Every structure is written in C-alpha cells, then in structure tokens.
Image (cartoon, rainbow, N blue to C red):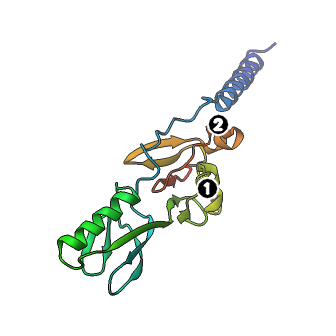
Amino acid sequence: MSQTFRQHAFFVTLLAATCALLGACAGLDTGTNPHIPAPASSAVLRSGDGLTIVLQGVPDPSSNPVQIDEQGVISLPYIGNVSAAGLTTAELSKHIHDTYLAKNIYTAVNVGVVVTDRYVYAGGEVNKPGRIAWTDDLTVSKAIEAAGGFTLYAKHTKVTVVRAGVAYVIDVTLAQKSPAEDPRLMPGDSLQVPRSPF
C-alpha cells in the first residue's frame, strides 16, 4: 500500500468521522424550551388592548372604543388621557368614574369597561408580520402559523418572545414536535423571527 493511498484513506476516514460527529451534534436536542413566567394576572390590561368604555347615567351616554397606546394610556371625552395599563377592568372603571367626578364633568356616572380585542405581535421572518388576535390557547407555533408561517430564510430555532421587557429564545421546531414545549402567549407579547445566516 503506497504512502499516498494510506494518506488518502486516512483523510477519507477522518472526513467520515467528522461528518458523523457533526451530524450527531446537529441532531442534539436540548429537549426543553425556557419557561416564560406568566403575569400575575391575565386580567391586567396591557398596551395594545382594545376596550369599549361605556358611560351611562349622564346627559350624553356614550360607548367609546379605545385602544391602550404604547404609553399605557387611553383618551376619553372631556377628561383626555387616562392611564389604563397595569389596571384591571374594575380598577380602570373606578379610576375613570373618580376622574369624571373630580373634574366636575358629571355629578354621577356609571362606567363600564369591556375588553374587546387583545393582541400579540409577530415580526421578522414571517410572511404576514403584524398584530395577531390573542386567544387564551394561542401558543408560539400557532402565532407563527397565524402570521403566515416562516419565510424561506427564517431561523426556526431562535425565535425571540418578549414579555414584560424580558426576551426568551424559543426553538419552534421543538415546539411543533412537543406541545409541552410550545409556550402559551399572553396579550402584549411580541415575537421576532431572525433571518438564518444560511
């Protein structure tokens, strides 16, 4: 056996072993996605929530559709901006009631607050980025589907979920294989799908 042939055989064997090792590494699965802590209460209002504020028992009863803006504020007739994010519907109702009375707009008013729309947001490498209507069974993989699925260049294993200012990296391939690894989303969560370098 010539020296050249032995060298060639060695390199072929080394290459095969390297490929097998890389294949095994690529197939390694951490087995779990990170736990994303749920908020203390899903009843707490968040930026992006759509509300209807009903004012009754006043000379000019009204039903006011509003959305909580990024500063956590809504705007209402006669009293202007009112902080809403972080409150429950009952707390917001009382706050609006008290504000109308404190500003002498009304001497009595009945205030009802109804949540009409809640959203999560999907961006990056999805086919239809933007708002997605939230339901209590919405998970990361379902949100990706609702956003039209991944683009051709999406990195499925590094989807970032941001909740309450904290980012969590989710492997959606793992989530699709195992429902236990598919975190439920909460209103106001945002997903960002990065572009794969390959």
The residue indicated by pointer 2 is 180
**Is residue 71 at all visible to an observer of this figure?**
no
Of 120 and 57, the residue lying toward us: 57
Q: How far across and how far down the image is residue 177, in percent? A: 71, 40
Look at the picture and state if 185 lies above or below 107: above
Report the residue at 47% width, 53% height from top. 189
Would residue 171 appear left or right of 10 to someone viewing this image? left
**Residue 71's quadrant in the figure?**
bottom left
Residue 128 visible, this angle: yes
From the top left corner, tell me how far across and down residue 174 is, in percent: 65, 39
Q: Which residue is identified by label 1?
A: 144
Query: Which residue is the extreme one toward the bottom?
Result: 60
User: Residue placed at 60% from the left, 56% from the top?
Assistant: 143
Residue 34 location in percent, x, y? 52, 35
How crowded pointer 2 is (Cα within 10 Å; few <14, some 14-19, many 20+) is rated as few
Residue type at mark 2: give it.
Ala
Q: Name the residue furthest left.
A: 103
Query: Is 105 or 144 nearer to us in this picture?
Result: 105
Image coordinates for residue 29, horizontal then vertical, percent:
64, 30
SS at mark 1? Answer: helix
What's the CA distance linking mark 2 and mark 1? 17 Å
Q: Which circle marks residue 91 in the picture?
A: none
Element at label 2 = helix
| Picture residue at 44% right of the left edge, 69% below the top | 51
Q: Tell which of 56 and 196 is nearer to you.
A: 56
Toward the top, the furthest residue is 1
Q: Residue at point 18% right, 70% down?
A: 102
Q: Residues within 10 Å of mark 1 (few under 14, many from 20)?
A: many
Q: Which residue lies furthest to the right in this view?
A: 1
Identified by mark 1, the residue type is: Ile
Q: Earlier in the sequence, mark 2 or mark 1?
A: 1
